[in-house]
Amino acid sequence: MKISLVEYDAGNLPSVERALALQGVQTERAATPDSIAAARVLILPGVGHFGQLMRTLGARGLLAPIRQAICGGVPLLGICLGLQALFASSAEAPQDQGLDILPGTVSALPVTAKLPHMGWNQLRQVRPSALLEGIPVNAYFYFAHSYAALDAGESAIALCEHGVPFVAALERQNLFAVQFHPEKSGDAGARVLANFVAHAGAENRV
């Protein structure tokens, strides 16, 4: 099984490729509508600005194929900005629409907290999850962001706190996303990626 990484010039894409390669996972970059449509598993990496991300995806004709892939049952993992892109909009760029797979708006973290939220923090798992299976409750993950989803309804599987509780990980059927960077989160992050790969592989065997 080969995993397709959505290519839109995200800075962390090579790091995600390396992290998956260490697990023996084959990857390819998907930068065209046809390559997204043909993907059996997708990862949407993310570093940067919400508006720039959405405009770049739109200019490359990738928005509709990504939505269609998710709605068609293709397993997708969003990372950091890739999680935020799943929502309808973001306070970082109110004029730009998100993928609108999940309702609601991504919010700015409070100015009372040190911004950006950068470094290691712990999760509070709020419901059982395939993505977080086997990960110790005291595990730390690496974050780098100033915006976050404060609510994802029943899709939220773990919260984190930095000035305010926010969604650190979500899971809904074939849709997975994390606000932290698993590719920079040591053994715990590697386990998250392995769990996603295992779930995606099982889905593709059905």
Image (cartoon, grey):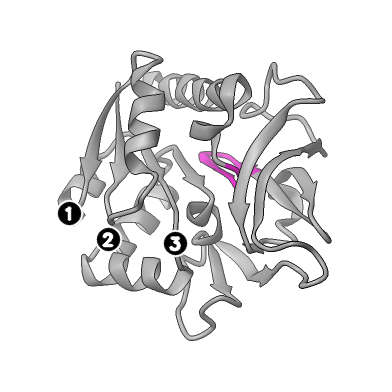
Q: Earlier in the sequence, mark 1 or mark 2?
A: 1
* Amino acid tagged 1: Thr
x then y, percent, for residue 145:
60, 57
Residue 170, picture quadrant: top right
At 27% from the left and 39% from the top, the residue drawn is: 39
Element type where label 2 sits in the image: loop
At 82% from the left and 38% from the top, the residue drawn is: 124
Q: Are marks 1 and 2 in contact (CB under 8 Å)?
A: yes
Name the residue beneath numbered marker 3.
48
Residue 185, picture quadrant: top right
Q: Earlier in the sequence, mark 1 or mark 3?
A: 1
Q: Nearer the viewer, residue 95 or 87?
A: 95
Vertical relation: 80 (above or below) 139: below
Name the residue beneath numbered marker 2.
62
Q: Which residues are magenta?
A: 170-180
Q: From mark 1 to mark 2, how far is it between C-alphas?
A: 7 Å
x then y, percent, for residue 47:
44, 55
Tally of marks: 3
x then y, percent, for residue 44:
40, 47
Element type where label 3 sits in the image: loop
Apparent side of residue 35 relative to residue 21 in the rendered image (left or right)? left
Q: Main secondary structure of the magenta part?
A: strand
Q: From mark 3 to mark 2, how far is it between C-alphas?
A: 18 Å
* Amino acid tagged 2: Leu
Quarter of the image for the C terminus: give it: top left
Q: Nearer the viewer, residue 57 or 38?
A: 57
Outermost residue to the bottom: 95
Element type where label 1 sits in the image: loop
Name the residue beneath numbered marker 1.
32
